[in-house]
Amino acid sequence: MRHLLSLLSLLAVAFSASAKNTAPAATDSVADSQSVGLVLSGGGAKGIAHIGVIQALEDNNIPIDYITGTSMGAIVGGLYACGYTPAEMLDVIRSQEFAYWSTGTIDPKLTYYFMEPPVTPTILKLNLGGDQSGLTSLLPSALINPLPMNFAFMELFAPFTAQCEADFNKLFVPFRCVASNVDKKHKTVFSSGQIGDAIRASMTFPLVFHPIEVDGDRLYDGGIYDNFPVDVMDDTFAPDFVFGVDVSAGNSDGDDSSMIAQLENMIMQHSDYNVPPRRGMKLRIDLDRFGLLDFDKANEIYRIGYDHAVAVMDSLKMRVHTRVPAESRKLRREVFKSLTPELVFDSVKVTGGHADQNAFIASRFMRHSTDTFGVIKARDAYYRLITPGKLRNLMPTAVPDGPGGPFTLRLKATIQKPLDLGIGSYLTTSTNSMLFLSAAYRTMSFSSLDMSLNGWLGQNYVAVQGRAGISLLRNMPTSLSITGVASRQKYFPNDRLIFQNSESTVATKDEFYARVAYGTAAGRNGKFEFSVGYGHLADKYYNRPSATNPAYRRDDITQNLGQARAFFEHYTLNDHNSPTAGAQYSISAFGVLGYHYFTFGGNTGSARARRAWAQIEFKSRNYWSLSPKISLGLETDVIASNRKLLHYYHESLLDAPVYDPCPSLTDVFLPEYRAYSFANGSFVPVWKIGSFLQLRGYAEAFVPLRDIQADKAGLACWSNWLPRVEFFGRLEAVATVKSTTVKAFGYYSGAHGAGWNFGISLGAYIRAPRFLR
């Protein structure tokens, strides 16, 4: 069958050659067949115009016999050389997958939420050990994460590398691309090898993308030394006519204030952008109003390229007389694609780590030595490996075992050092500011060990959390862990500014607990956990002297409780702190059994009572993007419990779950937001002013199932069913840069001690997990 297809290919090529006809020249003479070489400059997203130019050439049956390109010109030229049509190339550029590759974003549809590191207030992280230890590891080696692009380029180009036997002359159109060897101060022209590596090297802009290593040399963007490879076209292919397309930055007075534009001006050396008139012609397209990363403007840039090419088409036709009929080109492309092998792997070889680490990485792809697997399974294993953040880089290469495959998957791993130190904070104008410190030890092996120690130190909140877990070898990601937490939260009667420390403490809550959990992934976006735990809870309420009660009294409430808990969560939000799209659903069901001790007024004696109850908690956050600028969110928080009232009113209030509408009120003792069972709903409109700036509004309603009330003797009693609705409103401007969030906010609450308040915060407000809410 393959020989038959090869014969068809030869016939198609012959047909294509014979079908090239010549249009009459100005003198009505008929010229011999001409070869045409297409030269494509670099220019980042501006290079999308190259696709429009190619479409215009095909629409007018102008032949493209050879292609040379640099940077984005190498991407477009390489795709065309591999048989992609202009429409298919544009589909790739406009796809969500390309948006992920070009920005270094890991596609959430390919990861396991269960395996992602927990969200913490960390701002800076230090990875210790080896050559990357020390302060230098605070800075990334590139602005854009290389991991998504690594696999994507292998998937795109490896089959064509096998088809052409790593010889770029055997592609649908013979192809060359240019990269820069900065260490040796010269350009490198690729004519063979892995097509994906060659194109990656040609487009690897320094500091933005991670350098590509080929034969021991680190290679960068070809535009540093040759952004318009006309000389490569002449020296390699010597076509009869050269048509060059230049979309590089000109000398306009555009905005050069962006970091990328400044880097481009500093790094790019002078290139010759001329095509000698005797050799051909050049098309200069002014796209200076677009940035290097404006891929979201693909349609507009494509149309500009197409229109500019059409505008010079008459002049081009005067000099290029040869034509290639569309049907001939289509047939030859179809035959070429029919010979492209499927990407199927029969073995895996890993380098870069220790022997057990390499074996573990290989095992994620091949569970049995006799297995073969396709690109879908390979992609799943790849993203499963990179999700936990234990790999700095993982570079896949598909090496064909023969002309038609199958392939050996070669992986070069750069593994993170096991010890991480982190620091973060939440700084605000209220008294909720706190410092966050973390240390983690994480290994990658068949029984990967994850240990962490986190600490929070604030004016009103302190906590320590320790966790140790091991990964279990299962088809779905699974782990066994133990967690211990000690925390203290102080409560005050009012929200206060950071310098207002004169308020007396109303209450404190201390929690000390340990929990053993078995967890597993529930699909890619969910997780399920079953746990058992034991907690020691100590609450103190301070009865301050008043006109009706002149005596000072401290009541102590202590509980020793066992808990069995089942927890499920589904998570697809695009941001944990300020989402604009996606959803989060969580449901927790648990039973509690233990003893409660109450000491009245600090007396030495205490009353002991047995406690048992069941509780279900449901939370949801749903966000819909209604337009590029507007999103709408709905959030709910529901607790249903059969927990019984304790003896005294304040004792029961401290024991009850609390709803915290915003961080500023987490240290304010508000009876209005405490109930054993309640429901809360929030309506959240979001205006996305820019890529880093939002304006968010919150309109919330809190409804207790029954209020906790005090009788004349100060004992706790129930109110009527659904006694009231408590409203809360908040408006905040949010600016997010990398892992740091800055907010300016104002809120109003009708609860006593709240009212109107305004403030500013820096960082994410995330506390240690609670044993009971």
Image (spheres, helix red, strand yellow):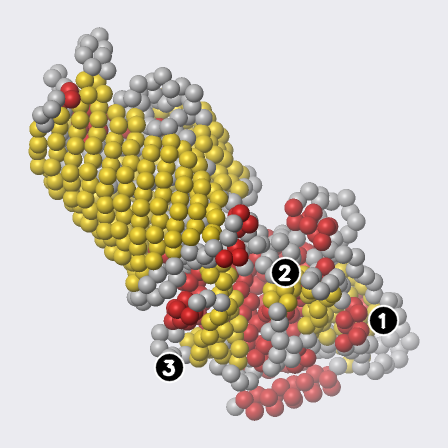
Residue at the spot of label 1: 279
* Disc 2 packing (10 Å; few <14; some 14–19; many ≥20): many
Q: Position of residue 359 (x, y in %)?
A: 40, 71
Residue 136, placed above or below residue 770: below
Residue at the spot of label 2: 204
Which residue occupies 44% across, 60% down? 386
Q: Secondary structure at mark 3?
A: loop
Q: CA distance from mark 1 to mark 3?
A: 56 Å
Q: Quadrant of the C terminus?
A: top left
Residue 370 is labelled as: 3
Tell me if 558 is positioned left or right of 632 in this view. Answer: left
Residue 212 figure quarter: bottom right
Tell me if 285 is positioned left or right of 90 in this view. Answer: right
Which residue occupies 45% across, 32% down? 427
Residue 712 figure quarter: top left
Q: Position of residue 172 (x, y in %)?
A: 65, 78
Mark 1 or 3: the one toward you: 3
Residue 54 shows in this picture: no
| Badge 2 amino acid | Thr
